[in-house]
Image: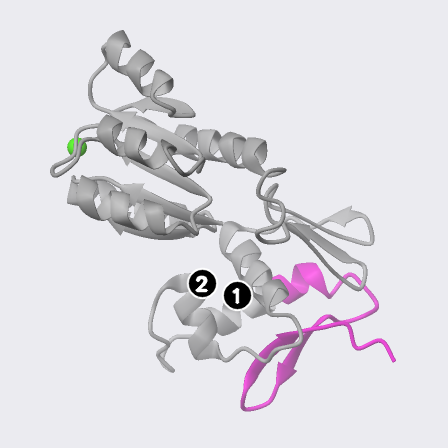
């Protein structure tokens, strides 16, 4: 799931990017309304988080321009508590509203609701449920089961599994996993990838007969069902 955050307060924008990335989303940032509108019109986003007070083009104007051609779900943020602004935002085509300051958990809860609501319309864009052998992962609901048993994964473990599922059958290097899941350059001094892979295996493979996550020596890891 790819989100665009349009927020001119750089610290808040970075905080949102970090938090949402850790929650498993791919996040792009725009720091003003002009860049934001440009990116939003290019499309490819599952949801927009849109601040109402922005330099360049303000949030409501941006929303009006966007809505002429795109129905991407929009969650608006505002520092103002006036009912007027909320009403204008919702009338202008925002799907939900959040007043600053807000709890990060409330933001993610609302994002999940909007994405779920939008899912049928966007079902063709990317599958949200993946299966390998008896493993089933619902990316939207962030739920993984194997042989019908729920796997209790941390956010990072889930993100790691989701990436490997999207690219199943393909060998992924530690460098690529580090970049995609941790947004960091892989450094052979750190064993963050190995540790996460080990933890994921303990939950994903250890309790079950058939191994799905394989090590390819000298290359990396691959997720596949090697049933003969
Ligand atoms: Ca602002």
The residue lying at 65 percent from left, 66 percent from top is 201
Q: Residue furthest front?
A: 68
Q: Is mark 2 within 8 Å of ligand 1?
A: no
Q: How many marks?
A: 2
Is 183 within the magenta?
no
For the residue pair 160 and 166, the one nearer the viewer reads as 166
Q: Is residue 53 above or below residue 82?
A: below
As helix, strand or loop, the secondary structure at mark 2 comes to: helix
Image coordinates of residue 224 in percent, x first then y, are: 71, 73
Check the image and name the residue furthest to the top. 83
Q: Earlier in the sequence, mark 2 or mark 1?
A: 2
The image shows residue 116, relative to residue 18, as above or below, that is above
* Residue 181: numbered disc: 2
Left or right of residue 96, residue 217 in this image: right
State the residue at coordinates (38%, 25%): 94
Give the structural element (helix, strand or loop) at label 1. Answer: helix
Residue position for label 1: 196
Give the number of the disc on residue 3: none
In the displayed structure, does residue 209 sit left or right of residue 78? right
Q: Image quadrant of residue 162?
A: bottom right
- Relative to residue 40, is residue 126 depicted above or below? below
**Left or right of residue 210: residue 168:** left
Contact check, label 2 and label 1, Cβ < 8 Å: yes
- Ligand 1 quadrant in view: top left
Q: Is ligand 1 less than 8 Å from the beta carbon at label 1?
A: no
Q: Is residue 101 visible?
A: no
Residue 77: x percent and y percent?
29, 28
* Region of the chain picked out in magenta, as a range: 200-228
């Amino acid at each position: 799931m790819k989100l665009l955050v349009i927020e001119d307060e750089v610290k808040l924008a970075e905080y949102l990017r970090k938090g949402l990335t850790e929650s498993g989303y791919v996040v792009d940032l725009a720091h003003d309304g002009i860049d934001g509108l440009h990116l939003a019109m290019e499309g490819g986003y599952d949801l927009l988080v849109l601040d109402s007070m922005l330099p360049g083009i303000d949030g409501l104007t941006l929303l009006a321009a966007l809505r002429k051609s795109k129905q991407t779900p929009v969650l608006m943020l505002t520092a103002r508590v006036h009912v007027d602004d909320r009403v204008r935002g919702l009338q202008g085509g925002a799907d939900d509203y959040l007043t600053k300051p807000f709890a990060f958990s409330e933001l993610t809860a609302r994002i999940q609701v909007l994405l779920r609501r939008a899912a049928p319309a966007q079902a063709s864009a990317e599958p949200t449920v993946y299966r390998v052998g008896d493993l089933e992962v619902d990316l939207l609901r962030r739920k993984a089961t194997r042989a019908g048993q729920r796997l209790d994964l941390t956010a990072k473990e889930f993100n790691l599994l989701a990436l490997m599922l999207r690219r199943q059958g393909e060998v992924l290097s530690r460098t690529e996993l580090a970049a995609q899941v941790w947004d960091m350059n892989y450094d052979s001094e750190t064993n963050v990838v190995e540790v996460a892979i080990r933890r994921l295996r303990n939950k994903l493979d250890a309790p079950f007969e058939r191994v799905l996550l394989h090590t390819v020596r000298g290359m990396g890891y691959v997720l596949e069902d090697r049933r003969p």
